[in-house]
Amino acid sequence: MAEYQRIEYQIGKDGKITERVIDASGNSCLQPTQALEEALGEIESRELLPEYYEGEEILTTDNLQRSKSINN
């Protein structure tokens, strides 16, 4: 089954566009907006939300446990 993300756009009075990917984590936050960002031009700034880092702690802990067992 395909995984869906919702993308929210806000366009300010000054023309500044803000996008937010909802229901995604990790690199899947960046992929659905890549083509549109390239078409619009330069990205002024990017703020990664906490959802981007979800799962990173698990990988770090898992890798740490593996390296301890290899060293022992």
Image: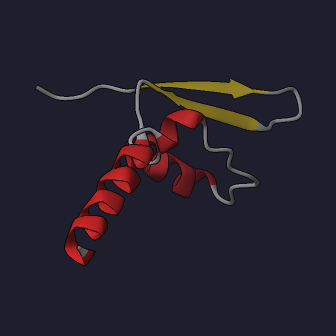
Q: Which of the 4 image quadrants contains residue 14?
A: top right
- Residue 52: x and y in percent read 50, 41
- Residue 59: x and y in percent read 34, 52
Q: In which quarter of the image is the C terminus?
A: bottom left
Measuring 50% from the left and 43% from the top, which residue is drawn there? Answer: 53
Res. 26 visible in picture:
yes
Residue at the far front in the pictured view: 72
Measuring 50% from the left and 46% from the top, which residue is drawn there? Answer: 36
Q: In this view, does 69 lie to the left or right of 20?
A: left
The one nearer the camera, 17 or 58, is: 58
Q: Which of the 4 image quadrants contains residue 16?
A: top right
The one nearer the camera, 69 or 46, is: 69
Residue at the far right in the pictured view: 14
Measuring 42% from the left and 37% from the top, which residue is drawn there? Answer: 25
Measuring 29% from the left and 58% from the top, which residue is drawn there? Answer: 65
Res. 31 visible in picture:
no
